[in-house]
Image: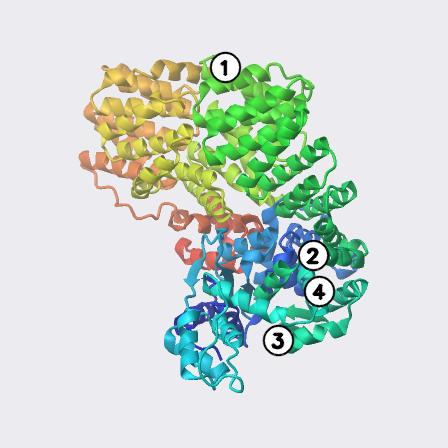
Amino acid sequence: MLIGRDREKERVAGLLADARSGRSGAVLIRGEAGIGKTALLDQVAADAPDMRIVRGAGIESETELPFGGLHLMLYPHSERFGALPGQQAAALRSAFGLPPPDDAEGRPRQETAGPVSDRFLIGAATLTLLSELAADRPVLCLVDDAQWLDRASLDALLFAARRLGADPIAMVFTVRDSAVPFPDHGLDVVRLEGLDRAAAQDLVDAHMPALTVPVRERLLDEAGGNPLALIELAKALGAQPARHAGHAGPLPVGGHVGGRVQQAFRLQLAELPGATRLLLLVVAADGTADLGVVLRAAETLGLGAADLGPAEEAGLVVLDGEEVRFRHPLIRAVTYQNAAHHQRIAAHGALAATLGGDEHADRRAWHLAAAATGPDESIAAELERAARRAGHRGGTAAVAAAYERAARLSTDAEGKARRLVHAARAAYDAGRPDSATRLAEEAAHLTGEDGVIAEATFIRAQVEYERTAPAADAALALEAAALIVESDPEQAVPMLTEAVWSARDAGAHDLVRDSVALLRKVKVPAGSAKALMTGGLIAYGRLLDGEPGAVPPIRALVKAAHDGDGDGDGNGNGNGNGNGNGDAVVERIIAGFLGLVVADDRTATALLENLAAEVRQQGALGWLPYVLEPLAIGRLLLGDLHGAESAAAEGLSLAADIGMDMQVTALRCVTVRLESDAERSRSLAPGVLREAELMPTNAALASWGLGLHDLADGHADAALDHLDAVCSGPARHDVLIRAVPDHAEAAVRAGRPDLARAHLPAFEAWAAAVSRTAHVSRCRALLSTGDDADEHYRAALVLHGDHAYDAARTRLLYGEWLRRRRRRTDARTELTAALDAFSRLGADRWADRARTELEALGDRPAARTGDADPLKRLTPQELQVVRLAAAGLSNREIAAQLYLSPRTVGHHLYKAYPKIGVTRRMELARLVSVS
């Protein structure tokens, strides 16, 4: 029975109760070594006989073996992999080194064999499998010593914990305090402190009831409520009833409780025979608890099973069938740390000699590395092969570790530099920017080979985007490309693409121009995707200088990207998210952005819709937030305000869950630009603008949104301040050129027609180049002082075509103008049309403006009810689920696309049906098509 911990047990009991009622949750229990984390997990497991328990633990010696922890937890359920979506099932099989299923298994879909293209796909598969296991009874997932899980396993489990929703699943992690921060974002954290004195005394009395009062009191004073310390320090004092009748002896020395406990273990180990200590070292070096492996390795050292006896009698190890485990992880750590260096080498060498066969190749490589006494090219080659295997399975952190250790064992500088740069790339892909920079800098100093230096510099550039600013990324990417622009133009193009786009984010036009100048020197095959991208980026540089002739090459790039004239599927070298070679994906994202810059909105948005679908189908989760950013903007510019909000919300949620901080900021800027919730936008804005200070293009998007909110609410002066900053800022020739008509409207409403004309010449030139002159006519109407405004408004409405939102904005202005001219009937017609359009689109603030104008005519239009479009009543995620269900996808298929569990999808539909007035799934298609 667990003594004390009533508060913690109550908290976890609530978590289990929620899971039993269908509400998922996760909690992280933190505390020092020996504080009782494992005991609490044991109690939690004992309290859940009705739940399916999936349990695992981190093992310090296996932190470099990809998916070792996840394998321990999920492999016993491998017979359920067939229920997962094909990409997810294939990813789990690949991660665990399992072959694809035979046709005889009768699977409804084929799994695609091959490397895991996205490290986050394993997390999605883990989420789906846990949901599958919870289909017949609630699941309790227990993860002990999570700080020692391999990074790939930890990422997968944390992703699942953050994405759980309406599932009967509870997850409990324990983490030991250490200097290394643990990624606890999104988890409820419970701090496990020492037992209070009464509970500590109960524990001592339960284990050693015959202790004398002085000894017991000293124990309580010294142990600080740490249960392990209470027990082990008592042993160190020799506090057994038969041996101690009075005063306490000396306690083990140490600066803190943990140190004294370790010293107590050292004293116990010191009492063992030398052969037993050496055999325990083999157990510690192995870390797998496989008794057969340990004994075979021990045999090569002249040891046998009998040598384990004294350790078992002392209670330091536990033998259970074919396993041998230390009673506490601290005993393993002390055993290994206390051994002489030559003994560790001998133990690892013995284990390497024992682990034959391909199935043990990774463990063998690491034991050989641990046994190495100097550079050894054959061991380095073994580790390099282990790195490639880990990469095939998607374990990017393990790839980095194996390549780095291989580099340390390399016998020549060039080979070491090459392996270090591979390690740096993998570290970056694994989300370890500090390691990536350190390894890249070391690699560059070891070699004179331009290609290696360029790749090392490029890795440093990509780290700098997140660490300092996009401008730093652009400068380093430009430096990297300059090294190889002639010798390896194919590789230089992605570097220069990064340079141009990072400089664009930074509003650093000088860096854009320098990058474009270097792009002009690139020689790639005419008509290839890289040639089109090169031409498009060069044209973008010209567009920043106001050259109207830059539009055709950009539109050619957008069309080619939309039509599929690419040269890759985005599955090769790194991209910073562990998703493989993202060059093709990056190029299509940029093509989508550029399409919006030149007002090719429909083609660009269709391109991005297709790309988002492909990324979902491939399971390339790490790319999705990058695709959803321009997709949200594209939908917004097309007047699909609900769709824009849905894309931004999904991207923001995913980016936050997988730790993409800069993309979170970019998507928060898009969120501020959305028109659905002005108050939320205003509350977000101060923080967002601070975060985006070094990303002026993104910040300008948020400022545009603030200006529009003020404009819609009738605060023309405030709107003018925001919009003037946008139209005068470094992003004024990008997508933000499209804010000029809003600036002109704000200036006119604020009584400053002089300011309204300030940015119109540049806008008129852009509009003429992209053949989108409707807004020019609207601006001319606003600035007209006579009856010719009527002609300009009418011209604008014709030119808007089927752009409903833009037309509604023009109709509102036209109706206001007509009302002031006392043309009441005409005004009523335009204002009513504007109100209907705004209501249908979900532009509530603008609808209120139109309603106010109609009231000034004496009309009494119906108050806002939200009934114009039932889909407006849905949350962004409910809307997304409904749209996919209306397209005919099953809950399981929707879950795979949105990286949710099928039960969570069903929960969203359950909540959505009464909101939109449907009772059957088949009604959704009609409702969505009408909307």
Query: Considering depth in this image, is 820 or 96 the residue closer to the camera?
Result: 96
Give the residue at mark 4.
278
What is the distance, in whole Å, between disc 2 and disc 3 at their CAs? 23 Å
Query: Considering depth in this image, is 784 or 608 the residue closer to the camera?
Result: 608
Query: Considering depth in this image, is 721 or 809 the residue closer to the camera?
Result: 721
**Residue, x 51% and y 67% (percent of image)?**
261
Question: Label 2: how many residues lie within 10 Å, few (<14), some (14-19) or many (20+)?
Answer: many
What is the distance, in whole Å, between disc 3 and disc 1 at their CAs? 76 Å
Amino acid bearing label 3: Gly
Amino acid bearing label 1: Arg
**How many marks on residues?**
4
Give the residue at mark 2.
344
**Residue, x 71% and y 72% (percent of image)?**
308
The percent position of residue 414, horizontal first and vertical second, equals 71, 31
Q: Secondary structure at mark 4?
A: helix
Give the residue at mark 1.
542
Residue 61 picture quarter: bottom right
Question: Label 1: how many residues lie within 10 Å, few (<14), some (14-19) or many (20+)?
Answer: some
